[in-house]
Image (cartoon, rainbow, N blue to C red):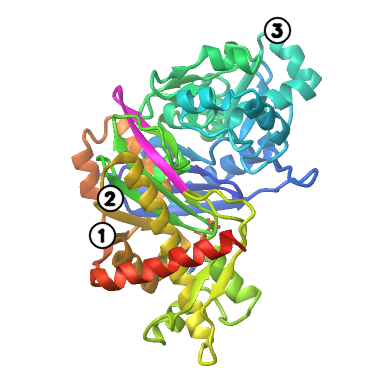
Amino acid sequence: MPMDYFLALDAGTTSSRSILFDSKGDIVAIDQIEFNQIFPQKGWVEHNPEEIWETQLRTIKRVIQKANIKPEQIVSIGITNQRETTVLWDRDSGNPVYNAIVWQCRRTTPLCQKIKQENYDKIIFQKTGLVVDPYFSATKIKWIIDNVDKAKKLLKEKKLCFGTIDSWLLYKLTGGQSHKTDHSNASRTMLFNIETCKWDNELINYFELDPSILPEAIDSNSYFGKLDKSLIGVEIPITGILGDQQAALFGQTCFSECEAKMTYGTGGFILFNIGKEIYHSKNKLLTTIAWTINGDTFRALEGSIFIAGAAIQWLRDNLQIIPNSPSSELAANAVPDNGGIYFVPAFTGLGAPYWDPEAKGAIFGITRDTTKEHIVRAALEGIVFSTKDVVEAIEKDSNKKLISLKVDGGAAKNNFLLHFLADILNVEIIRPKITETTALGAALISALGCGYFKSFDELKKIYKVEKIFKPNMNEEKRNNLYYHWKKAIDKIRNF
Ligand code: ADP
């Protein structure tokens, strides 16, 4: 019997990747190609949509070669993508009218300020669960239409297509046949109503857009179209799409309410499954659609910490007190405690729940016997305390308790970090065997979409745990450490 394979297309911010999974959820082959980051002005970030497509297609061909399988053995394709990044293209020719404006791009700050002055941000928050910020797609679409003549012309002729990167790739993969997206991606555009799960006409009018530009927004495990035969010689159904953070939540099998995942990369992203309800955060967290599966919409609270692994990079590159990131674990374990050192890594301001863009980082409690190991340990502890701050906000907003936390990302390799996280959050921390959770999520949603797997229970069987970190700290110590962290936060805010 030939094996069945599932192809995950992971369209990231810096690279296109294709990952082949077998039906046990194990990785068979990976291919990755980086693409150019374009910075036309300070604060502007763009990608070339054609380059995204070409690199993505090349990785598809190369991953099949690497795995040495026949394309016919691929049962389904799932897409996961950098969210919010905006592409507008000509429906007939498939040519983009402008570069993709990337989620990081700040060019629409003035428009966002105007929205706030008009007090319309409250309505947007109510409808979309998002705080008004250049990050999201709507103001980016508006910018392209206002600044690119071709876009205006196509809009008049009703030939303009908008898409986030999932839609753009889908359009190309299907030879221009499919202009669709899923609810998780739609919920990041600032045009999608997270209660009705429909594009919101009032918002479309407010931004002076036309509904004809929007992709059809459907369930995350839908049939989105099929791979155009001219590309690799076979037609393969595309049956799953999820934005990257939601895909990680799915790949971590956090299918139930109160399950959560944390991705520790440069920064940290936490998503907390809130089930079918909607809460609007009072602590500046976002409410977003996790996925819609067979008509059931699950939502999530999303919080981010700006600096996670980046604090360790800073110790390595700026202070040069560790040779590489993994050695931070050894250094932290070389001392019995933090020696009274508290390190607030607020290099780029403070995120949720403080939202203080002016805050700067600080190291407190230095004495003559402070060593570099104490500083390294305090940096890792600082990442944990920042996580605790966001978890507290989540628990306040939802009035629910986190039951465990699943982790992934580069810094989740650090055992000290995860032990301390278990101690401070007082929950089990679970690290999976497959840390490519985003790609796994895309593969799993497509396997569900094509009917290969039928239930969440079947998917859960595929999930393999590598290590569980259990809390082992008494309450007094935990409270004492966190109390000092809060004091440190207080000091930097009043510096
Ligand atoms: P991104 O996707 O944001 O580029 P990655 O998931 O690749 O990030 O993770 C890279 C980050 O993780 C870097 O900031 C690096 O310093 C940090 N990191 C990698 N390994 C470790 C480790 N063992 N301990 C602590 N931090 C680590």
Quarter of the figure with residue 361 = bottom right
Q: Earlier in the sequence, mark 3 or mark 1?
A: 3
User: Which residue, given by chain and number where applicable, does mark 1 sit on?
Assistant: 427
Is residue 401 visible in this depiction of the protein?
Answer: yes
Of 430 and 135, nearer the camera is 135
Residue 157: numbered disc: 3
Mark 3 Cα within 10 Å, few/some/many (few <14, many 20+)?
Answer: few
Q: Residue drawn 43% across and 84% down?
A: 339
Q: Residue drawn 39% across and 45% down?
A: 271
**Where's residue 134, x and y in %?**
64, 36
Quarter of the figure with residue 93 = top right
Q: Is residue 328 magenta?
A: no
User: Which residue, given by chain and number where applicable, does mark 2 sit on?
Assistant: 402
Q: Is 143 displayed left or right of 326 in the figure? A: right
Q: Earlier in the sequence, mark 3 or mark 2?
A: 3
Mark 1 Cα within 10 Å, few/some/many (few <14, many 20+)?
Answer: some
Please state which of the two labelled residues, at mark 3 or mark 1, is closer to the viewer.
1
Of 116 and 313, nearer the camera is 116
Please state which of the two labelled residues, at mark 3 or mark 2, is closer to the viewer.
2
- The residue range painted magenta reads 291-303
Q: Is 435 displayed left or right of 114 in the figure? A: left
Of 132 and 406, nearer the camera is 132
At mark 2, the secondary structure is loop
What amino acid type should be assigned to the residue bearing mark 2? Answer: Leu
Evaluate if marks 3 and 2 touch, with contact meaning CB atoms under 8 Å apart.
no
Separation (CA) of disc 3 from disc 1:
56 Å
The residue lying furthest to the bottom in this view is 369
Q: Is 279 displayed left or right of 426 in the figure? A: right
Q: Residue drawn 26% across and 40% down?
A: 257
What amino acid type should be assigned to the residue bearing mark 1? Answer: Val
Separation (CA) of disc 2 from disc 1:
8 Å
